[in-house]
Image (cartoon, rainbow, N blue to C red):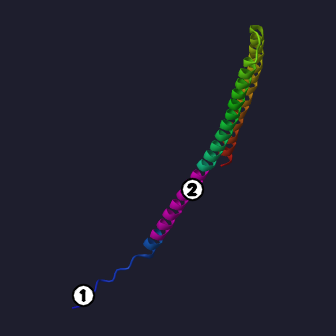
Amino acid sequence: MTDQMPKFEIPEAVREFTEKSVDQAKKAFDDFINATHGAIAKVEKTSTASQASAAELQKTVLELAEENVAAAFDHAQKLTKAKSVQELVELQNAFLKTRMAAIGEQTRVVSESAQKAASAVAETAKKA
């Protein structure tokens, strides 16, 4: 008696079907991985654009804050040199007038900078 297993062959059609199934599953997985990599790249590009735009906006706001503080110190120095109450009032009125104009301009600058930042992020998201 021999301990041989009975010879059983897998039909050609079953092997072909199995091979096609494995190939299709591998292709589906590869497509999924490629789509995932694409999505990650898009998020990274958009995130980078957002960070750059936010940094630019922060830089603008910081520059404007420095301008305001410098103007306030300059005004304080002028006030210390005033020789009368009338001169103090005139200096204060002039300061308020120039600062109100500056605030209007600064508001415009910040608004434009924020709009530019939002547009840059939106454009990057479209391209990514």
SS at mark 2?
helix
**Residue type indicated by callout 2:** His
Instruction: Find residue 63 and report its horizontal and vertical position in percent.
Output: 70, 34
Q: Residues within 10 Å of mark 1 (few under 14, many from 20)?
A: few
Q: Which residues are magenta?
A: 18-41
Find residue 37 and name its label. 2
Observer-nearest residue: 84 or 34? 84
- In the rendered image, the residue lying farthest to the bottom is 1
Position of 119 relative to 1 (above/below): above
Q: Splitting the image into 4 quarters, where does residue 118 fall? A: top right
Numbered disc 1: secondary structure: loop
Who is closer to the viewer here, 64 or 89?
89
Residue 23 vs residue 91, the one in the foreground: 91
Left or right: 63 with respect to 25? right
Magenta segment, prevailing SS (helix, strand or loop): helix
**Mark 2 or 1, nearer chain start:** 1
The disc labelled 1 sits on which kind of residue?
Answer: Asp
> Circle 1 is placed at which residue position?
3
What residue sits 78% from the left and 16% below the top? 94
Q: Position of residue 82 (x, y in %)?
A: 76, 15
Q: Quadrant of the N terminus?
A: bottom left
